[in-house]
C-alpha cells in the first residue's frame, strides 16, 4: 500500500495538478462501554456523514479518498478513528470546508448516540503534511504493527497489547480481546472508486515485479487441524487465541511446528475456561439452593448432589471435546444387493 501511494497515486495527483488533504474523524469514547456497540454506531455515523458531505466534496472537485482505520487502545478505551486522504482542486477554501465537516460530523454522531468536541474533525490541507509519511503509517497500521519506537500518549496498538499480555499483563489481554471483537471484519483501508477515476490500477492489482518474486520465494503454507483452530479461538477462551496463533506464525520459518504447538496450547486454555464456566454455573445453583435449606443435613445433601452433577458434566464435556478434536475416521463399507450391478454404501 505504501509503495502504491508513493509510486502510483502521488505521481498521478501531481500530473493532474490536484491537491490532497488529510481529514481525520474521531468520537468521544470511554472504557466502561460496549466497544462493539460503539464501533457499530461509529460506522453508522460514518456512512451518514459520507452521504451528507458528498455535495461539499463534489463542489471542491474531489475525485475520492483513501480511507484508513486506526484502532489503538488507551486509558479511555478503544480510540477508533479514520484518516481520509482526499483530493481537491487548488484554491478551495479548506477552512470553510473544515467548519462544514465538523458540523455534519457532529450531527451524524448525534443521530447514533455518539458525540465529539471541536477536535472530532481535524483537517490538514495540501502542504501541511507529508503524504509519504502518511503512506508509511498506513502500511504500518494495515500490518497491525507499530513501527514507531514510542506510542502517542497512552495509546497502544493491538500487537503492543498482545506483547504486554505475553509478559503477564492480563488487562492488556482483555483489551485485545475486546478491541478485536469490536473491529473484526472491518477494512483497515480502502480506496473506493478513486483509483478508477484517476485511471490507475488499484493497490490489489498493482505489485512490483520484485515484490511478486519475493512473495513466491518467501511464501509458506502452514497447516494444522481446523478443529484445533475452532477450539483455540472459541469466544469462551479467556486468552487471545487467534492473536497467539498469528504471533507463532512469525516463528514458523525458523521453528517449524510453532503454530501447531500454539494452537494446542490455546485449545487447552479454552477447555480450562469451559470447565471453569461449568463450575461457576453449578456453584451458583448450589448457592441458590442452600438459601432454602434449613438444616445442616439438607445442606450436606445438596452439596453432595451438586458436586456429583458438576463432576459428571465436566467428565461428559471432556469426552465430547476429545471426540470433537480427535474424530474417528468413518469407514464406508459397500453392501451388495440382490440386484446385479447395484451397490449401496452405508457409513
Image (spheres, rainbow, N blue to C red):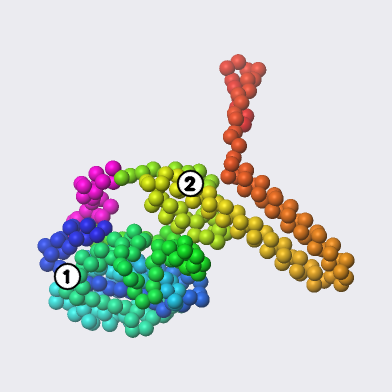
Q: Which residue is nearer to you in this view: 191 or 140?
A: 140
Which residue occupies 17% across, 58% down? 7
For the record, the magenta segment spans 196-217
Residue 78 vs residue 205, the one in the foreground = 78
Residue shown at the point (55%, 61%) measured from the top left? 238
Instruction: Identify the disc placed on residue 260.
Output: 2
Task: Identify the residue at image location x=19%, y=80%.
Answer: 93
Report helix, strand or loop for mark 2: helix
Classify mark 2: residues with Cα within 10 Å, few (<14), some (14-19) or many (20+).
many
State the quadrant of the C terminus: top right
Question: Regarding mark 1 in the picture, which secondary structure is present there?
Answer: strand
Q: Quadrant of the N terminus?
A: bottom left
Can you give x and y, in whole percent of width and height, for residue 113 in the image?
46, 77
The image position of residue 128, as x and y in percent, is: 19, 76
Q: Nearer the viewer, residue 113 or 266?
A: 266
Judge from the rendering whether residue 326 lies leftward or rightward of residue 283; answer left or right.
left
Figure check: 3 above or below 332: below
Q: Is residue 144 magenta?
A: no
Sooner in the amino-acid sequence: mark 1 or mark 2: 1
**Rounded to the nearest whole Å, what is the CA distance between mark 1 and mark 2?**
50 Å
Check the image and report above or below for 326 versus 22.
above
Q: Quarter-wise, where is residue 137 in the image?
A: bottom left
The x and y percentages for residue 315 are 70, 50
The label number, if any, that marks residue 19 in the structure image:
1
- Residue 163 rendering spot, x and y as whole percentages: 43, 63
Q: Residue furthest top?
A: 340
Amino acid at each position: 500500500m505504501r509503495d502504491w501511494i508513493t509510486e502510483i497515486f502521488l505521481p498521478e495527483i501531481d500530473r493532474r495538478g490536484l491537491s490532497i488533504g488529510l481529514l481525520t474523524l474521531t468520537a468521544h469514547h470511554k472504557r466502561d462501554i460496549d466497544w462493539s456497540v460503539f464501533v457499530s454506531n461509529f460506522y453508522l455515523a460514518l456512512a451518514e456523514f459520507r452521504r451528507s458531505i458528498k455535495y461539499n466534496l463534489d463542489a471542491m472537485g474531489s475525485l475520492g479518498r483513501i480511507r484508513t482505520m486506526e484502532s489503538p487502545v488507551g486509558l479511555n478505551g478503544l480510540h477508533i478513528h479514520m484518516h481520509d486522504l482526499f483530493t481537491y482542486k487548488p484554491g478551495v477554501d479548506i477552512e470553510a470546508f473544515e467548519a462544514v465537516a465538523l458540523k455534519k460530523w457532529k450531527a451524524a454522531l448525534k443521530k447514533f448516540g455518539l458525540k465529539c468536541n471541536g477536535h472530532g474533525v481535524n483537517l490538514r490541507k495540501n502542504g501541511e503534511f507529508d503524504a509519504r509519511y502518511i503512506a508509511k503509517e498506513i502500511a504500518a497500521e494495515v500490518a497491525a504493527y507499530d513501527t514507531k519506537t514510542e506510542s502517542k500518549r497512552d495509546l497502544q496498538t493491538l500487537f503492543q497489547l498482545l506483547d504486554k499480555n505475553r509478559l503477564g499483563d492480563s488487562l492488556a489481554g482483555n483489551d485485545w480481546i475486546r478491541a478485536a471483537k469490536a473491529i473484526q471484519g472491518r477494512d483497515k483501508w480502502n480506496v473506493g472508486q478513486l483509483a478508477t477515476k484517476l485511471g490507475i490500477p488499484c493497490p490489489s492489482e498493482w505489485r512490483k515485479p520484485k515484490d511478486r518474486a519475493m512473495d513466491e520465494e518467501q511464501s509458506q503454507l502452514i497447516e494444522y487441524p481446523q478443529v484445533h483452530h475452532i477450539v483455540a479461538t472459541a469466544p469462551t477462551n479467556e486468552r487471545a487465541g487467534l492473536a497467539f496463533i498469528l504471533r507463532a506464525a512469525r516463528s514458523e520459518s525458523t521453528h517449524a511446528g510453532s503454530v501447531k504447538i500454539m494452537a494446542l496450547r490455546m485449545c487447552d486454555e479454552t477447555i480450562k475456561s469451559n470447565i471453569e464456566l461449568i463450575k461457576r454455573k453449578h456453584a451458583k445453583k448450589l448457592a441458590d439452593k442452600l438459601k432454602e435449606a434449613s438444616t445442616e443435613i439438607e445442606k450436606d445433601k445438596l452439596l453432595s448432589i451438586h458436586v456429583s452433577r458438576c463432576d459428571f458434566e465436566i467428565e461428559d464435556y471432556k469426552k465430547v471435546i476429545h471426540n470433537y478434536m480427535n474424530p474417528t475416521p468413518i469407514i464406508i463399507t459397500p453392501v451388495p444387493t440382490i440386484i446385479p450391478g447395484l451397490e449401496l454404501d452405508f457409513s
